[in-house]
Amino acid sequence: MWREKVRPGNRIFPNAFRSLRRGCRLPGDGGRTESGNPQRECRGFALTIGAGWISNLALRGARDILISPADAEPMTVHQAKICIGCWQQLHLPVPLRGVLSVPFRAFGIRPSKMNPNTCTFCELAFTTIMRARKVTTDATVMFADLRGYTTLSESLPPDAISGLLDAFYDRCADAIWEHDGLLNKTIGDAVMAVFNFPIRTEDHTKNAVRAAREIQNRWRIEREALVAGLGLAGSELGVGIGIHAGELSFGEFGRSHRDLTAIGTVVNTASRAQSAAGADQILVTGEVWRRAQPELADSEVRAYQLKGFPAPIELYAA
């Protein structure tokens, strides 16, 4: 049976949760800790939680719930038993569902709203987990925008607009999560997704393209019902998507209001590609086109003058 390795110097106590209640504080508690060292105590918090989880397993005899390293690979949103982000970054098994997740929920650790296969600990303790306020990583960024929303918002009642956005967000989230992406932001009538952080996948660019196509497919089905109910033309509810891949910065930005997100040229280019995309269209950059082969072998290419870029950029229709 596989067991988690404990690094030298990290001892596991059976009364882990009692120790946690006595001393450890949750990350983000104004920077105040019992030891005076936020990083050490937050790391201790994570190890204590992990220790409690392992102790729970031993007490319950739940050998069938222990996972092997292979089982910790990215799964669909409905199947992950542990936080994939914590597992890949810390090798720490944090249960997300079932009886074993109850003690963790008592301390505010639960599935993240950005991706239910990651947990809120990934968000709250990002600086400690990554040992930096931001990290540079290779990732793929996708923007998806609901075309015609601004015009419709002026003619439809608030309830109808709210229902429209809810349906759009849900279809996007389902597709993004099923391809191991992070739904990082909802910006009015658009969403921003990041692939390859914190869930690492070798084919993250292909996953982004597949998620984009899945968004289009699901939205076409959803749109039929919405069009009938709202009395609109189908062309008024198209989705434009832009994708770019490369090196970016991901982390906590801002001081008075912390924002966990990605920044950099990759993000800006993906956003501009989305702006250039028409309704029901996916536009990807040359970098995405190269990485996603052979899935984009037949894509048509065209030069676009994107806002903020001095020279035209070639974008491929996916």
Image (tube, rainbow, N blue to C red):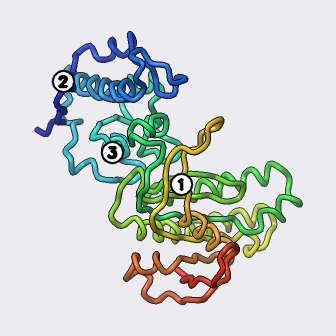
Where residue 92 appears, as percent x and y from the top left, is 29, 37
Placement of 316 over or under 274, stated as above or below: below
The residue nearer to you, when weighing 165 against 22, is 22
Nearer-the-camera pick, 49 or 157: 49
Instruction: From the image, tell me which residue sits under label 3.
Output: 89
Q: Residue 175, relative to residue 70: is it above or below? A: below
Q: Secondary structure at mark 3?
A: helix
At 20% from the left and 20% from the top, the residue drawn is: 59
Tag of residue 58: 2
Q: Where 2 falls versus 243 (above or below)? A: above
Label 3 – label 1 distance at C-alpha = 17 Å
Asked if one can make out residue 1 in the rendered structure from this viewpoint, the answer is: yes
Q: Position of residue 242 (x, y in %)?
A: 58, 71
Question: What separation in Å lies between label 1 and label 2 (alpha carbons)?
Answer: 40 Å
Q: Residue at x 54, y 83 (%)?
A: 316
The x and y percentages for residue 100 are: 33, 28
Is 159 on the left-hand or right-hand side of 80? Answer: right
